[in-house]
Image (cartoon, rainbow, N blue to C red):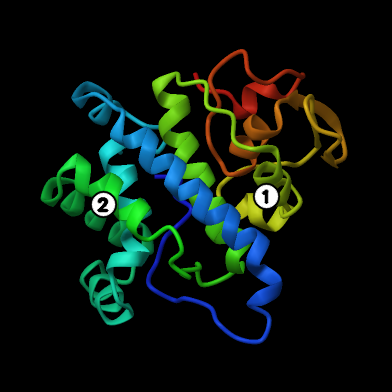
């Protein structure tokens, strides 16, 4: 699925929470904007394949709110049912929830939980923002919608790109230097791979970017066939 793996209601609180307020505000804004976008889609668009292989837009939208809706015991039960496979669990839940809820409900979950403190098991609020932004692009890029993710959110996520994180999402950055055209940002060493910051973010999260959006001698490695 190429997921950013939403795996349960594991909100973070504590002394450092106040210092995380700017990124939490970015998360809330991203969720509200994506809710607005989802509410504007046609039935045909909801059933369009996303960048997550095997998932339509509606499965991605359902997956995005899993962490708000599933308490940890339910997540663990679903994981047991899936034989311990996180991939199988998230796939099964996304498909079941996409069938169980209407499109207005799926959009509403993001709006209603804009300030929910859910974070993935690792990575904290930056990973939560990445989950929202990248899955949002799984939808908008697949639909050919020209949504520009605000620069501050893209920068936060690009600054968290590492070889380890890219490998986790199935992206091979070996011998490649990511070079953003629209931001003063590069990462890695090797043959330049050029594109917008958000397209490079997609590549670093293991997505196959539509042809023509990335440039460089290694661009085919990150481009949809």
Mark sitting on residue 64: none
**Residue positioned most to the top:** 212
**Front one among 104 and 63:** 104
Residue 173: give x, y in percent of width and height.
72, 41
Q: In the rendered structure, are the residues bearing label 1 and label 2 in contact, judged by CB atoms less than 8 Å apart?
A: no
Residue 48: give x, y in percent of width and height.
28, 26
Is residue 181 shown left or right of residue 79?
right
- Let me know if residue 185 appears in the view: yes
Q: Residue at x 36, y 57 (%)?
A: 87
Q: Check the image and report above or below for 83 versus 152.
A: below
Residue behind mark 1: 157
**Front one among 32 and 143:** 32
- Let me know if residue 53 appears in the view: no
The answer to which image quadrant residue 113 occupies is: bottom left
* Secondary-structure class at tag 2: helix
Mark sitting on residue 94: 2
Labels 1, 2: front one: 1
């Amino acid at each position: 699925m190429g997921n950013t793996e939403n795996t349960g209601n594991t909100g973070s609180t504590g002394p450092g929470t106040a210092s995380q307020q700017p990124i939490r505000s970015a998360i809330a804004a991203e969720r509200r904007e994506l809710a607005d976008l989802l509410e504007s889609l046609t039935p045909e668009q909801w059933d369009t394949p996303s960048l997550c292989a095997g998932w339509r837009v509606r499965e991605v939208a359902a997956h995005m709110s899993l962490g708000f809706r599933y308490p940890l015991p339910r997540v663990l039960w679903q994981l047991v049912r899936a034989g311990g496979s996180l991939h199988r669990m998230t796939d099964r839940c996304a498909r079941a929830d996409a069938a169980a809820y209407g499109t207005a409900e799926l959009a509403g979950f993001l709006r209603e939980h804009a300030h929910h403190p859910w974070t993935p098991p690792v990575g904290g609020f930056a990973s939560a923002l990445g989950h929202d932004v990248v899955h949002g692009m799984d939808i908008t890029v697949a639909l050919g919608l020209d949504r520009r993710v605000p620069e501050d959110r893209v920068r936060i996520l690009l600054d968290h790109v590492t070889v380890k994180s890219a490998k986790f999402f199935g992206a091979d950055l070996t011998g490649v230097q990511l070079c953003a055209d629209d931001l003063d940002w590069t990462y890695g060493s090797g043959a330049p791979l050029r594109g917008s910051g958000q397209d490079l973010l997609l590549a670093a999260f293991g997505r196959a970017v539509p042809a023509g959006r990335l440039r460089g001698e290694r661009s085919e490695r990150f481009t949809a066939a």
